[in-house]
Image (tube, rainbow, N blue to C red):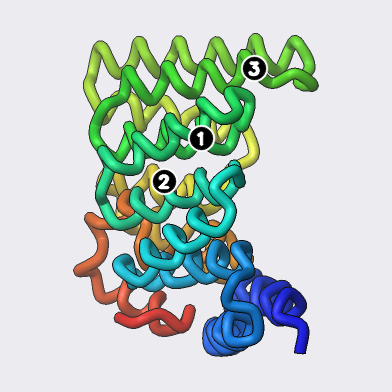
Amino acid sequence: TLGEAHAALAEVEVSEWNWPAAERGFERALELNPNYPTAHHWYAEYLSRFGRHDEAIREIRRAQDLDPLSIPIQMIAGHVLMMARRYDEAIAEFKQTLEMDPNFHLARLFLSETYINKGMYEEALNEAEKRVTRLQDAPEGQVARQRENFAEMRAAYRQSGARGFHEKRLEQQKRGQKRPFLMARLYVQLGDNDLAFEWLEKVFEKREGDGYLYVDPQLDPVRGDPRFRELLRKAGFPN
């Protein structure tokens, strides 16, 4: 009968992409404890992953009402709005998060991504640079390399626009971790759909990308591709 435990178990199910079990868990958690802000927060993220944006916004607003000083809840309000393509509202929420804590790096990362979604690449790079310069525990060499990467991306953008930005970012990823979800998104943005789907299959196999396969704005160009609909079907999303 402990709502907090049902919410925690539901979040585990989310990490495994066990979507029906996750939704049942969140609903049970909120039935048992409707005033538990974290359950509303996590349920909002779940709903956002399925494109149920109005419901997601309603849940995250409830979480904010219950815990107005929670920095993670404030940040997720921005993320939910970003996934709903309400970019200006998302930017405002992320900026509010950073007013609460200028060193909350994930909020700055999401703010940068929102600017990319809006095509505001200079602003995206500015926020990314701020995030790196504020990393207190990062080795000095790592910070220097990141600054060099941002300088390269800025130069590429100024020379070749959005395509140059994504090409340079992809080149840098190839030298680094090659995170599947980011690799897939970059190939989509560059119009190389065959390679994009190779990486999207890895996203599915590894349950990577935090489960936002269905709604991520940077995957919009391939939504009409039959391969994408099949991938959504396998992953348990509407297609």
**Residue plotted at (67% across, 14% down):** 143
* Residue bearing mark 1: 97
Q: Looking at the picture, how far across and down is residue 200, in whole percent?
A: 46, 62
Q: Are marks 3 and 1 in contact (CB under 8 Å)?
A: no
Secondary structure under tag 2 reads helix
Of callouts 2 and 1, the N-terminal one: 2
Residue bearing mark 2: 78
Quadrant containing the N terminus in the rendered view: bottom right
Who comes first in sequence, dot 3 or dot 1? Answer: 1
Per the image, label 1 sits on a secondary structure element best described as helix
Image quadrant where residue 165 sits? top left
Q: Are marks 3 and 2 in contact (CB under 8 Å)?
A: no
Is any atom of residue 4 visible in this view? yes
User: Is any part of residue 18 visible from this angle?
Assistant: no
- Tell which tag, 3 or 1, sits nearer the viewer: 1
> Label 2 is placed on what type of residue?
Gly
Q: Quadrant of the C terminus?
A: bottom left
- The CA span between labels 2 and 1 is 9 Å
Residues packed near mark 2 inside 10 Å, few (<14), some (14 to 19) or many (20 plus) = many
Does the residue at mark 2 contact the one at mark 1 (Cβ under 8 Å)? yes
The residue indicated by pointer 3 is 134
Q: Residues within 10 Å of mark 1 (few under 14, many from 20)?
A: many
